Image: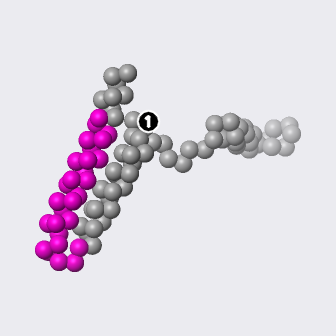
């Protein structure tokens, strides 16, 4: 114990909490850390791809599955293409 009656761990904990709260006040808290090259349109394409993947998983018959897979592959290609073009354009600047 130190002279004031507090332990070193409690002091470190207090300092860490003070720094963390100050950083959150100044910078704000980011829940998700997205890459800058991924735009909102690309995120929409990714979500569309996920929805199509869910449709494949919930298809009732084997006849429906190939139809859903075609839509999924198109959505997958679209999402990849949009991210790739944004990445290329970002590096050209």
Which residue shows up at 86% across the image and 37% down it?
A: 3
Where is residue 8 drawn, in percent x and y? 73, 39
Magenta residues? 59-85
Name the residue beneath numbered marker 1. 36
Which residue shows up at 68% across the image and 36% down it?
A: 26
Up the image or down, 77 lies above or below 85; here it is below
Which residue shows up at 29% across the image and 35% down it?
A: 85
Where is residue 2 drawn, in percent x and y? 81, 38
Can residue 42 be seen by looking at this rendering?
Answer: yes
* Secondary structure mainly formed by the magenta segment: helix
Which corner quadrant holds the N terminus? top right
Residue placed furthest toward the right: 4
Task: Indicate the quadrant where residue 53 lies.
Answer: bottom left
Which residue shows up at 23% across the image and 58% down it?
A: 72
| Residue 62 as seen in the image, left or right of residue 7 | left
Q: Say which element carries label 1.
A: loop
Can residue 16 be seen by looking at this rendering?
Answer: no
Where is residue 14 drawn, in percent x and y? 74, 42
> What is the image's colouring?
one colour
Up the image or down, 84 lies above or below 66; here it is above
Which corner quadrant holds the C terminus? top left
| Residue 77 as seen in the image, left or right of residue 24 | left
């Amino acid at each position: 114990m130190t002279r004031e009656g507090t332990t070193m761990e409690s002091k470190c904990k207090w300092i860490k909490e003070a720094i963390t709260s100050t950083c959150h006040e100044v910078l704000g808290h980011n829940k998700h850390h997205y890459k800058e090259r991924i735009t909102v349109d690309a995120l929409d394409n990714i979500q569309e791809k996920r929805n199509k993947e869910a449709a494949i998983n919930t298809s009732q018959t084997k006849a429906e599955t190939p139809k859903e897979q075609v839509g999924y592959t198109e959505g997958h290609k679209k999402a990849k293409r949009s991210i790739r073009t944004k990445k290329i354009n970002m590096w050209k600047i």
